[in-house]
Amino acid sequence: MGEFVLAIDQGTTGSTVALMDSHGKLRASVNYEFPQIYPQPGWVEHRPMDIWASVGKGIRAIMRKKICKPSEIACIGITNQRETSLLWDKHNGEPLNNAIVWQCRRTTQFCESLRVAGHEKAVRRKSGLVLDPYFSASKYRWLLKNTPGIARALKSGRVAAGTIDSFLIWRLTGGAAHVTDVSNASRTSLMNLKSRRWDQSLLELFEVPRDILPTIVPSSAVLGHTKGVPGLPDGIPVSGVAGDQHAALFGQACFAVGDAKCTFGTGSFILMNTGSEILHSNAGLLTTVAWQLGEKGKPVYALEGGAFVCGAAVQWLRDGLKMIKRAPDIEKLALQVQDHGGVEFVPALTGLGAPHWAPDARGTISGITRGTERGHIARATLDAMALQNADILRAMESDLGKRMRPLRVDGGAAANDLLMQIQADVLGRRLIRPQVIETTVAGACYLAGLGIGLWQSPAELKHIWQAEREFAVKMTTVARRKRQSSWNVALHRTLL
């Protein structure tokens, strides 16, 4: 058996290909971007072959580094942008249309019509998701109604549908495997959380034929083997797949109930492990399948919540208000003051996500006086990023009925030490930042390695995962309550 895992991290703006050795060390990675397509306001598309080309370019670039021989690659793991959806021809693998990206809002009116008709409760009970164009089902429906020549292709049995993981596996295996893992399937609004199979009533509601969809498989198992991939030998097992946020949860070794991770990106994505039982949220959160290890393994479920604007608030200070030249400069600016000075910034620049779900909310800055400086606005921005996450995490604790474990953090903004300390303080929980910050890649590698026996169990992976730094709580309970109260007042004003 080879000693290396090849990971493909297929993201919204680019594809990363990386190599991890059997000791869990990332040896190399490369990233290649591809074009974003905006046909109309609110519409976002990708050309599937641009995605595949970026992956292929990454594979060839990694192999040119000569860290290992192609024959030393033991397996391949995949993690991907989750809800992005596409159709392709089963006979030749050619895309039938552009992919509709998870950010695209073109199916808003259709989703609203289902809500008005009273279908949201059933959709949420079966799939764990709210009725929203974010998820894949309405995207498939749109493609099936708007792709030229689709009726003839459907009649002849040529149509394959899937999320990006399915398309990549199809390409990597030369068309031999049309599959998707349970984590990606759980983001479509078409999978029944309990049975982990496509739900007939949901298929009928969204008008999606079952026979065009991939087979739902575990996140860690041999799903197919490479065939005809430039730069790779035939026969390498594809043995690990998970959506990007699920892979990050696994890559952070969040294997116990109550373990949670927060990814600080453009927005923030928070997932908490809730174990083998389905837990429906009473606090506006989503229920999702985190992963399943092997055909006989029990599924692990998670609660998920996200703030639409996290790092994007810093980008707005940089690009909109011109307060800073570079995003990392916000830490230095915020350290010029002792605290937020009474200034509150609620960054509802694109509405508010979980647990409020207020798409029409708009951002507010309040509490400004003659003594307000740029540093106070910078500090209020970092506070807001942390306070939003604290609201989500407390909602998760309420749903779970128990106290969460220390929060594990990743993503670009996790490098900001001041933000991490603020997050620990307003949450009242210890934070842990890992040595391997590329947690989506790590998760894909761990799942793939487990799938072929390179590692024997998650317990072994817990020894591989290492912390880089911990942030202890320094704020008193009284100070935390006072800070939360001020934030709640500003949030209430925003929601009016």
Image (cartoon, helix red, strand yellow):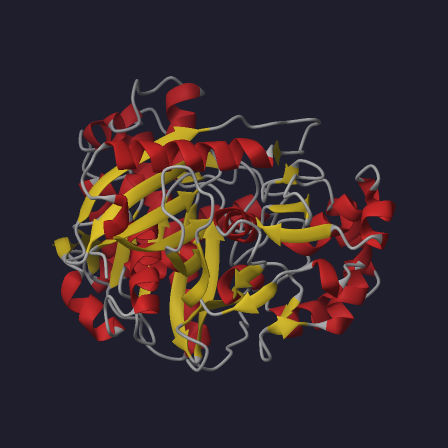
Which is nearer the eye, 443 or 445? Answer: 445
Of 356 and 248, nearer the camera is 248
Position of 334 compared to 47: left or right?
Answer: left
Q: Residue at x 62, y 49 (%)?
A: 134
Horizontal placement of 372 versus 420: left or right?
right
In the foreground, 272 or 236: 236
**Can you give x and y, in whole percent of width and height, for residue 242 in the image?**
44, 58
Residue 456 location (% of width, % of height) = 24, 74
Q: Residue at x 70, y 48 (%)?
A: 139
Relative height, residue 288 to residue 107 (above, below) = below
- Quadrant location of the N terminus? bottom left
Question: Looking at the image, is 163 positioned above or below residue 56?
Answer: below
Q: Quadrant of residue 24?
A: bottom left
- The image quadrant that residue 346 belongs to is top left
What x and y, as percent, mark residue 5?
A: 28, 53
Q: Residue at x 68, y 52 (%)?
A: 160
Which residue corresponds to the image point at 77% horizontal and 59% vertical from the top-left? 206
